[in-house]
Amino acid sequence: MLNWAYPLGWPEGLAAIIFFLLYLGYALRTRRLAAPLGQRGWALGWKLVLRVAYVGLLGAALLGPAYGITQRPVRTAGKDVWLLVDLSRSMDAVDVAPSRLQKVKQELTTLVNRFQADRLGLIVFGREAYVQCPLTYDQAALQLFLSTLQTSLVPAGSTDLAAPLELVLRRLERSPSAAAEALPRAVAIVLVTDGEDFGENLEPTTRILARSGTRVFPMGVGTAEGSRIPQAGGRGYVRDARGREAITRLVPAPLRRLAEQTGGQYFELTDRRNEFPLLLNALNRLEGQAEQVRTVSVADNRYRYPLVLALLLLLLDVVVTVKVIRP
């Protein structure tokens, strides 16, 4: 099946229109000059066919005709990135438009597209943590899981930041590649949350992460002023035990400590600034120690065939001359 590496867009269409207009002007000018001599300039006809042919072939080569599948080796730097996303009810707050969770989903989509050579996994959490997508190179699958994230995926309850971190540690212990590789894979954790932690002491888990060499990059989402939490279905707002509307606020202190103790870096996503680009740069600087080569299937771009044929026709156009107006 024939596919194209690049879609046909307005630049290509504009170039075709300009070529047609210029050639039409050339043909009309030649006809006007030939008329006083009683000639019509029809010798231009086969040149027109020739030039349309090689200009079209050049355009096809630029669009990248791909036919068939080729297996190519891709060298990776052995980096694993776990995305830990808070799905507690407070992530529905709208102090970051359109909501904390919706904004996070948009930014994580960009993050996934930037790390094509690394394995990424997705863990969601609230009171408990669940592996939504194990470590994978399949970006399409991960993007699908990201698009379905909503706070109703996890049981309602108080947020426990230790739960997803401990789940990552258990996955690392069971990883078969950890024992097989002479050099360990670099592991990074992107913890996306508003920082509200109602779990037990986070220090023991932090110390284990630091000893394992796993770096944590927390992304604090929300504002210091905070916001009310919408009820599911838009039926008012969540209320506390006293019947008052609950206010959720960004709590950066535990996230900053977590980043400092594991050698990571803390970032924020608020209504005034977006530090996701800084997070991407920090992850790019994290180099994996163990290199590996994997084979991927890619479409075979066969642009050379129309390009060579176009150049041959262009050479024929230059070599063969035609007398349009005869004295």
Image (tube, helix red, strand yellow):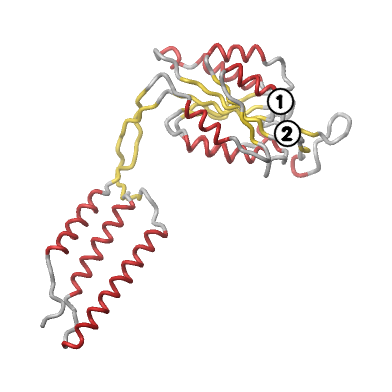
Q: Position of residue 6 (x, y in %)?
A: 38, 50
Instruction: Residue at 31%, 33% (x, y): give it.
Output: 72
On screen, residue 231 versus residue 322, left or right, reads right
Q: Position of residue 28 (x, y in %)?
A: 27, 79
Instruction: Residue at 29%, 38% (x, y): give it.
Output: 70
Q: Residues within 10 Å of mark 2 (few under 14, many from 20)?
A: many
Query: Which residue is under mark 2?
Result: 90
Q: Position of residue 192 (x, y in %)?
A: 62, 30
Q: Residues within 10 Å of mark 1 (few under 14, many from 20)?
A: many
On screen, residue 82 versus residue 64, left or right, reads right
Instruction: Residue at 65%, 23% (x, y): give it.
Output: 256
Q: Nearer the viewer, residue 41 or 71?
A: 41
Considering only vertical position in the picture, is 190 above or below 223?
Answer: above
On screen, residue 295 versus residue 263, left or right, reads left
Q: Position of residue 219 (x, y in %)?
A: 62, 30
Q: Nearer the viewer, residue 141 or 311?
A: 311
Query: Which residue is under mark 1?
Result: 159
Q: Label 2 to label 1, Cα distance in Å?
A: 9 Å
